[in-house]
Image: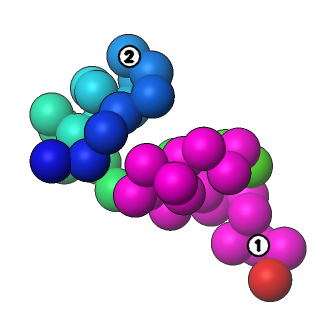
């Protein structure tokens, strides 16, 4: 199980959500895809 940094991360894991509309690197470190960071690549 991934260590989750926020309540949002916990809910995302429970609902099997793998991506977030976010730029925050913490989402990537928790194992999610930060969609706004992806658009910068």
**In the image, residue 39 above or below residue 37:** below
Q: Residue 26 at x, y = what percent?
A: 60, 44
Which is nearer the eye, 39 or 24? 24
Residue reaching furthest bottom? 41
The answer to which of marks 2 and 1 sits earlier in the sequence is 2
In the image, farthest residue toward the top: 7
| Residue 13 image-quadrant placement | top left
Q: Is residue 19 visible?
A: no
Q: Position of residue 20 (x, y in %)?
A: 52, 47
Of 23 and 4, nearer the camera is 4
Residue 29: % across, % down: 52, 54
Q: Where does residue 14 sit, x and y in percent of width and height?
A: 15, 34
- Is residue 21 inside the magenta stretch? no
- Crowd rating for badge 2 (residues with CA inside 10 Å; few <14, some 14–19, many 20+): few
Q: Is residue 28 left or right of residue 12?
A: right
Front residue of 28/20: it is 28
Q: Residue at x 70, y 44 (%)?
A: 24
- Dot 2 falls on a residue whose secondary structure is helix
Picture colour scheme: rainbow
Q: Would you name the residue on which mark 2 appears?
A: 7
Mark nearer the viewer, 2 or 1: 2
As for residue 26 lying within the magenta part, the answer is yes
Q: Does residue 13 appear in the picture of this structure?
A: yes
Q: Which residues are magenta?
A: 24-40
**Secondary structure type for disc 1:** loop
- Tag on residue 16? none
Instruction: Name the side, left or right, on which 21 lies relative to 40.
Output: left
Please name the residue shown 26% across and 47% down the image: 2
- Please give the residue where the numbered disc 1 appears in the rendered image: 39
Disc 2/disc 1 C-alpha distance (Å): 25 Å
* 34 over 8 or under it: above or below: below
Whether residue 25 is situated above or below residue 40 in the rendered picture: above
């Amino acid at each position: 199980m991934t260590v989750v940094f926020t309540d949002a991360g916990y809910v995302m894991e429970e609902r099997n959500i793998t991506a977030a509309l976010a730029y925050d690197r913490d989402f990537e470190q928790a194992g999610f895809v930060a969609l706004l960071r992806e658009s910068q690549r």
